[in-house]
Amino acid sequence: MPLPKISEARELSDERLVEEILAVKKQLFQLRLQKATRQLEKPHQFRHARHRLSQLLTVETERKKAVAKES
């Protein structure tokens, strides 16, 4: 499974971006819980979730800086 592209994150609306960030954070929590209880079957999901979260946070920061620069 390939890593998600940042272009997909840049296409999201501001509201959808916040929802995605929360969803990925919840997913990471669930993965950590599964790992602690030895129920985790696919450890590569950690990498994908962390990668996706970093992309989403990067896009959010870029947008905040763009708004601050315009003001």
Image (cartoon, rainbow, N blue to C red):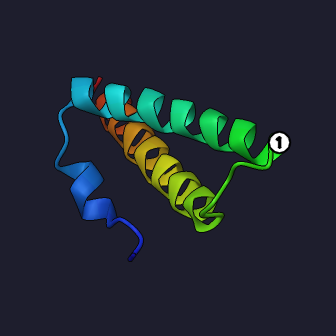
The part of the image, by quadrant, that contains residue 43 is bottom right
Tell me what residue is drawn at x 64 percent, y 44 percent: 31
Quadrant occupied by the N terminus: bottom left
Tell me if residue 59 comes above or below residue 1 in the rendering. Answer: above
Tell whether 13 sits left or right of 19. left
Tell me what residue is drawn at x 45 percent, y 39 percent: 61
Tell me if residue 71 comes above or below residue 30 in the rendering. Answer: above
Q: Position of residue 9 (x, y in %)?
A: 28, 51
Tell me what residue is drawn at x 42 percent, y 71 percent: 3
Q: Position of residue 7 (x, y in %)?
A: 24, 62
Residue hosting label 1: 36
Of residues 51 and 68, the one drawn nearer to the viewer in this rendering: 51
The part of the image, by quadrant, that contains residue 4 is bottom left
Query: Identity of the amino acid at label 1?
Result: Ala
Q: Position of residue 21 (x, y in %)?
A: 43, 34
Tell me what residue is drawn at x 39 percent, y 37 percent: 60
Q: Position of residue 28 (x, y in %)?
A: 60, 41
Tell whether 63 sits left or right of 38. left
- Mark 1, other Cα within 10 Å: few <14 / some 14–19 / many ≥20: few
